[in-house]
Image (tube, rainbow, N blue to C red):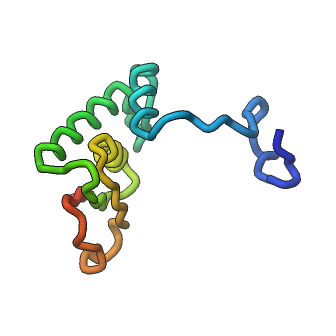
């Protein structure tokens, strides 16, 4: 058990919340895949009052990954994501990882001219 004096935030944890968790095994792609399979009906996301189940999130990731694959994205390709914190960002993030490509995060509030042009594909809000 971690010492609460060394980590003062632990005092704010609700009773029963563990202070330490074991590190999960596998990649982020493995973790989301396993979670979709194990908890399909549980809420994965809640955004502005709308819930998305893990099953729905998994389907959206599958569709986005296939769309990126059809655009020619391959393992190792950099793919820029220029989206705010929203469900579409999560879908794009995992879709890129599923293909073995590299996520290149950009702040959507940054001026367009300052964003790099080295990414193969850019996923952005229109």
Quadrant where the N terminus is found in the figure: top right
* Residue 97 falls left or right of residue 34: left
Q: Position of residue 28 (x, y in %)?
A: 44, 40
Residue 114 percent across, percent down from the top left:
30, 79
Q: Quadrant of residue 32?
A: top left
Q: Who's the residue at 40% across and 26% down the image?
A: 36
Q: Nearer the viewer, residue 123 or 15?
A: 123
Picture residue at 36% right of the left edge, 58% below the top:
84
Tell me how many marks there are. Answer: 0
Give the farthest residue toward the bottom. 113
Residue at (34% x, 50% y) in the render? 89
- Asked if residue 105 is positioned above or below residue 92 in the image, the reply reads below
The C terminus sits in image quarter: bottom left
Classify 30 as above or below 41. below
Give the answer, above or below, for where 68 lies relative to 14: below
Within the image, what quadrant is residue 65 found in? top left
What residue is at 43 percent from the left and 26 percent from the top?
34
Q: Is residue 107 above or below residue 13?
A: below
Residue 120: x and y, percent? 20, 61
Of residues 94 and 82, the one drawn nearer to the viewer in this rendering: 94
Left or right of 12 on screen, residue 21: left
Q: Nearer the viewer, residue 78 or 60?
A: 78
């Amino acid at each position: 058990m971690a010492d609460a004096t060394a980590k003062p935030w632990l005092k704010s944890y609700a009773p029963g919340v563990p202070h330490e968790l074991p590190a999960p095994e596998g990649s982020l792609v493995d973790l989301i895949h396993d979670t979709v399979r194990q908890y399909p009906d549980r809420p994965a996301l809640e955004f502005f009052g709308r819930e998305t189940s893990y099953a729905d999130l998994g389907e959206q990731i599958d569709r986005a990954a296939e769309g990126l694959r059809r655009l020619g994205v391959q393992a190792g390709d950099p793919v820029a994501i220029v989206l705010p914190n929203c469900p579409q960002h999560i879908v794009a993030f995992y879709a890129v990882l599923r293909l073995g490509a590299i996520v290149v995060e950009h702040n959507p509030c940054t001026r367009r001219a300052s964003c790099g042009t080295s990414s193969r594909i850019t996923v952005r809000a229109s």
